Amino acid sequence: MVLSQVYFDMNAPRVAEEVGNLLFHASKGDVAGIQKLLDQGMPVDAADYDGRTALHLAASEGHSNVVNFLLTNKADVNPIDRNGDTPLANAKEYGHTEICKILADRRGFIKTHGLEEFEIPISELNLNQGKFIGKGAFGEIRVVKWRGTLVAAKTITAELSKDPQIVKEFVDELALLANLSHPNIVQFLGAVTTQRPMVMVTEYLPKGDLHDLMEKKGKLDPGTAICFALDIARGMNYLHQHKPNAIVHRDLKPRNLLQHDAGHLKVADFGLGKLLDPLSADCDALYEMTGETGSYRYMAPEVFMHKHYDKSVDVFSFAIIVQEMFEGANAQKYQLPKSVAIARAKDKHRPAFNSQSYPPGMKELIQECWDMDKSKRPPFSVVIQRLEKIQQQGGFVSSEVGQDKSGKKRSDKCTIM
Ligand SMILES: Nc1ncnc2c1ncn2[C@@H]1O[C@H](COP(=O)(O)OP(=O)(O)OP(=O)(O)O)[C@@H](O)[C@H]1O
């Protein structure tokens, strides 16, 4: 299996345009247009930056004449694009059965997304010897030693593992997580999916979560709050910009923000959110059962009100978290999480700004991010720019990030990338 050959580089915009034309003709079913480009020397397997070839496009759009033409011109039947998809995978996805047959007859295949490589035999995990570190709606988390390294193993409850639909979605979702990597997201390492209990294994972050840190420290200094806000926004921006579909967290909260050794935060627990509808009776019962009703405090009104929602729900949760970092303890800590969500959704209630430590521009940013109107909330790409500006203008440095174990400062501050 070879990844599609990208036929041009950054310095060759003209060639990039020609590849674009080739792909355009393929998507429109225009054999003559493709022939002309091939006659001019364009390789039949030329691919764009996403590794998409003419065959991918023709297969996706259902042009069997183009598929046959390209294969007759010796096109590779199994080029793999950036998403790991072959033309057969595209044809199948869009329901073009005739093209599926043409490609399959030429030994076309669908690349499984590599989850086999991530399958861990349960015997390698020694779950019973692992130290219990937490419990959520999906199951328990334990620290175990796996292949010589301490990792976090999240077991999926027997109840959830029994439901074939949930099992299927869990496996599909893991295949997606297996391809993700970013400094501000917790790294997926592998999973047990063929034995029970099902387990998801990620890197272990021993410094704990933001919830516990805020319980211990109260409000954070502005430098740290900005630095953490940037960490969260960068991790979330990576997930939201994921192609072809954005990964929406839906349960962003301080318990899901874990501190790395160097102090930076990483976003945990993404991807599995859609397995549980946070407002379904089942999930509610699970939350009540595990005492994990904390999610309501960070929930966007449209989710709580069962309205249509999109990735901006994460921007809402982000705003509540940032306000908490500047204020210290959650002001509504003693109210029932569900009544907090009701007040936010029905009465448009928002937490108050009492602290004097907000730098210029910060309150405005938070207010935009928790706007009732989801279309007014800025995307994380914009949030990052705004935070970087606030950080630069105030010359902020974190007291938490970039310290070694003895508490001495290291040179790693909250670097602006
Ligand atoms: N990779 C990890 N490294 C270190 N600690 C972790 C890791 N993952 C989770 N934890 C700890 O375990 C706790 C429970 O995590 P878990 O994801 O199961 O539940 P949750 O996020 O609180 O709830 P839910 O899954 O229901 O949203 C977290 O709050 C965190 O402190």
Image (tube, grey):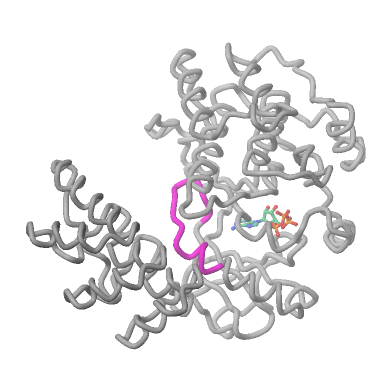
Please state which of residues 50 and 53 is positioned toward the viewer in this rendering: 53
Coordinates of residue 380 in the picture (x, y in percent): 54, 35
Coordinates of residue 40 in the picture (x, y in percent): 7, 57
Report the predominant secondary structure element of the magenta stretch.
loop
| Quarter of the C terminus within the rendering | top left
Give the answer, above or below, for where 95 lies relative to 245: below
- Any magenta on residue 185? yes
| 396 left or right, relative to 16 | right
Give the answer, above or below, for where 158 lies relative to 325: below
Magenta part of the chain = 174-186
Please indicate, yes or no, whether residue 261 appears anywhere in the rendered image: no
Give the answer, above or below, for where 366 lies relative to 307: above
| 258 left or right, relative to 103 | right
| 340 left or right, relative to 383 | right
Please indicate, yes or no, whether residue 230 appears anywhere in the rendered image: yes
- Please tell me how many numbered marks the rendered image carries: 0
Rendered-image quarter of ligand 1: bottom right
Residue drawn at x 39%, y 75% is 88
- Any magenta on residue 371? no
Residue drawn at x 62%, y 68% is 153
Splitting the image into 4 quarters, where does residue 165 fall? bottom right
